[in-house]
Amino acid sequence: MDFSFAGKRALVTGAGKGIGRATALALARCGAKVVAVTRTQADLDSLVQECASITPVCVDLGDWAATEAALQDVGAIDLLVNNAACARLQPFLEVTADQFDQSFDVNVKAVLHVSQIVARGMKARGSGGAIVNVSSQASKRAVRDYAVYCATKGALDMLTKVIALELGPHQIRVNSVNPTVVMTDMGRLGWSNPDKAKSMLTRIPLGRFAEVEEVVDSILFLLSDRSKMTNGVTLPVDGGFLAC
């Protein structure tokens, strides 16, 4: 399926690596003017070298005031992908307050904040828009050592539904994608051990983890007019994991 986002402006968070970077590049290839947000300047520099039309914004989304300042002048945004996230792997009994707060600040609060900033502009212009939040199958199934990550993604799914409910009357659609393990840097951090990977792979009917491009394709679909009656969904990209 070919997508065209000509004439659209898109903002992608966590655009320095993995799914976010691939999404930013795919949107640019499809004609969108892309604003790429991440906290690591070196990642932004290499992204702009790869695609000169991308506008870089370097900010730590866990910092509310810095985010407000960094995004106040980005201009009209039609499409938003909230991809930035962090994962801290710890047994439940070893979770600390700082690690809990950092995960919720990035995985949930930053999504709320960036969506507020972008959606206010969408609503004021009256031209609608689309928001996609990158969630996880971990929002729906417990995973050992992922207590806080699972909790943040569960919160993100419900946040997605509430935003969809409130923004729907303004023709702003809000959905999430919920991938299985994707072998990005974050994915390798948690699943590089063959024995641990096998325990997950045996529960995926397709017998493999997701490729980055497969998640990006789902994001593009949810951003596009091909899904203009899709709102408030959490779309599994999991090879059938949640069906079993």
Image: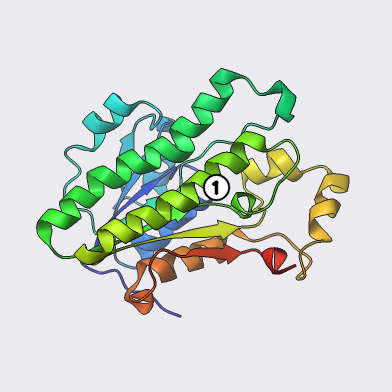
Give the image quarter of residue 70: top left
**Count of marks, rendered view:** 1
Q: Position of residue 80 (x, y in %)?
A: 33, 54
Residue closest to the eye, 179 or 32? 179
Q: Position of residue 121 (x, y in %)?
A: 16, 51
Residue indicated by mark 1:
154
Q: Is residue 24 visible?
A: no
| Circle 1 Cα neighbour tier, 10 Å, few/some/many (<14 / 14–19 / ≥20) | some
Residue closest to the eye, 74 or 33? 74
- Say left or right for 183 vs 119: right
Coloration mode? rainbow
Q: Position of residue 71 (x, y in %)?
A: 24, 38
Residue closest to the eye, 152 or 223? 152
- Say left or right for 126 vs 233: left
- Say left or right for 97 vs 240: left
Q: Residue at point 34% right, 54% down?
A: 163
Q: SS for tag 1?
A: helix
- Say above or below: 1 vs 134: below
- Say left or right for 144 vs 217: right
**Quarter of the figure with the C terminus:** bottom right
Residue kind at label 1, given as amino acid type? Gly
Q: Position of residue 113 (x, y in %)?
A: 31, 39
Q: Outermost residue toward the right?
A: 195
- Say above or below: 87 vs 127: above
Q: Residue at point 59% right, 50% down?
A: 139
Q: Residue at point 57% right, 23% down?
A: 99
Q: Is residue 200 visible?
A: yes
Q: Residue at point 35% right, 76% down?
A: 229
